Image: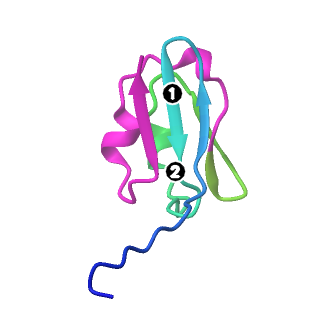
Amino acid sequence: MANAQVQTAEKIESTENQKVKISIVPRYCKGCEICVKLCPTQVLGMEMFVVKVVDIDKCNACAACELRCPDFAIFIDKK
């Protein structure tokens, strides 16, 4: 079994529009709110101690949230 691979299906919540796709891994989010506080356009909010997308249409894809998340729980893909 030296070559065995373990695959786990990680729950990822994705929200997207024509400009950007925001992906969040809820299990990684510890609810520190760093991403929420750093977002210049108030795209993100908190729900039950986990980050959520509040208004994706305001997102300018600056990726400040992704760059500052200490837990790698959020990813920005500019289209």
Cα–Cα gap, marks 1 and 2: 20 Å
Quadrant (top left/top right/bottom left/bottom right) for the N terminus: bottom left
Tell whether 8 sits left or right of 38: right
**Residue labelled with disc 1:** 21
Disc 1 crowd rating (10 Å Cα; few below 14, some 14-19, many 20+) is some
Q: What residue type is labelled 1?
A: Lys
Give the structural element (helix, strand or loop) at label 2: loop
Seen in the picture, residue 3 relative to 18 is either above or below; the reply is: below
Q: Please tell me in which quadrant of the rendered image residue 71 appears.
A: bottom left
Q: Give the range drawn in magenta.
A: 52-79
Depicted 53 relative to depicted 70: above or below: above
Q: Does the magenta stretch include residue 4?
A: no
* Residue occupying image coordinates x 42% and y 40%: 75
Amino acid of disc 2: Glu
Q: What element carries label 1?
A: strand
Q: Does the magenta stretch include residue 61?
A: yes
* Image position of 36 with respect to 71: above or below: above
Label 2 belongs to which residue? 33
Q: Which circle marks residue 61 in the picture?
A: none
Q: Nearer the viewer, mark 1 or mark 2?
A: 1
Rendered image quadrant of residue 65: top left
Residue at the image position 55 percent from the left and 11 percent from the top: 18
Q: Residue 79 appears in which quarter of the rendering? A: top left
